[in-house]
Amino acid sequence: MLARGERVLGIDNLNAYYDPALKRDRLATLDGAAFTFLPVEMSDRPALMAALKAHAPRRVIHLAAQAGVRYSFENPQAYVDSNITAFLNLLEWARADGSVQHIVYASSSSVYGGNTKQPFAVGDAVDLPVSLYAATKRADELMAQVYALQFDLRLTGLRYFTVYGPWGRPDMAPLKFARAIFEGRPIEVYGQGDMRRDFTYIDDIARGTVLALDETGHFGSVPHRVYNLGNNHPEPLLRFIDVLEAAVGRPAVRVMQPMQAGDVRETSADIDLTIRDLEWKPTTTIDAGLPRLVDWVRGYYHYDGR
């Protein structure tokens, strides 16, 4: 957004779910007069309202959330605060403001829950969540539908599928596994490795998100729509580890584990609707994306020469 000349307001609470130093280092790459950052807790309604009133953004990409499937069993309140209350506060601001042109918000492939049909299509039933995280993301979609219907807010939800790449979350397998392989530590392979994921590279996700923000011609009578953003090519977890090992240049110490609560065996995105409306297709395979991630890990964590 900055590269194409937009003025951008960034809001984040920089919480300690993972090392805030990584978040601050990300922010340090976004300098210049066109970017403003505010350390605001979005579940704090007065603070959020004051920040948005002062800067008056007309378009919003809402990615703020408490992520992580497993952590939702340990700290459920964080998910209600960050994923439901914060989103409600944003919707209420947009309703009162009256001049917001479009809100794009992050949903998740987790909403498909216990569905066994593959690939997952936007029209599939999403009433079988297997984690509180998934339930909060589905709640976001339902709230967006109501605010679009009742208050004519224009909203687009994006169901992201296993996003990875440079600057990614250290609690997710791509970055966590890469660091462990570099350091010779074991990696825990859940589901005995019998899992498949639609790993989607960050550049493809960013491009799709901006396309969704720009494209406003495919709304129905209710101005709310949902799309899948996924690689449309689920990879076996063990092949994913093979590619990661090759990129790092050493084998992983694999410790096979059973499935964990909240996990699903496979995620696969049906992106026909996304291709039709947004003209978006992913272009980065794991064979190209994982080496880029590894290059970033090697430099950021100073693994050169180890």
Image: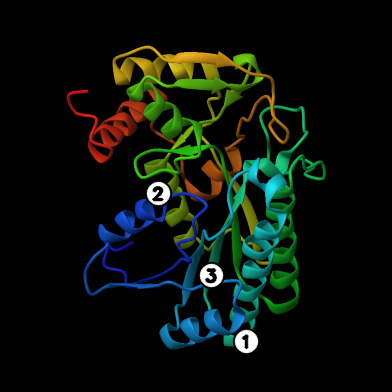
Identified by mark 1, the residue type is Ala
Q: Position of residue 67 (x, y in %)?
A: 58, 50
Q: Is residue 8 left or right of residue 254?
A: left
| Quadrant of residue 282 within the rendered picture | top left
Query: Toward which corner of the image does residue 298 lie, by quadrant?
Result: top left
Q: Earlier in the sequence, mark 2 or mark 1?
A: 1
Q: Are marks 2 and 1 in contact (CB under 8 Å)?
A: no
Residue at (69, 47) in percent of width and height: 74
Residue that carries the numbered disc 2 in the rendered image: 207
Between 81 and 253, which is closer to the camera in this rendering? 253
Q: Position of residue 200 (x, y in %)?
A: 47, 35
Amino acid carrying label 2: it is Arg
- CA distance for labels 2 and 1: 30 Å
Residue 285 visible in image: no
Toward which corner of the image does residue 71 lie, by quadrant?
A: top right
Give the image's coloring scheme.
Answer: rainbow
The residue sitting at 37% across, 43% down in the picture is: 203
Mark closer to the chain start, 3 or 1: 1
Q: Residue 215: in sight, yes or no?
A: yes
- Residues packed near mark 1 inside 10 Å, few (<14), some (14 to 19) or many (20 plus): few
Res 211 label: none
Nearer to me, 174 or 279:
174
In this view, the residue in front, 104 or 108, is: 108
Quarter of the rendering occupied by the N terminus:
bottom left
**Label 3 sits on residue:** 102
Disc 3/disc 1 C-alpha distance (Å): 14 Å
- Outermost residue, right side: 127
- Residue under numbered circle 1: 96
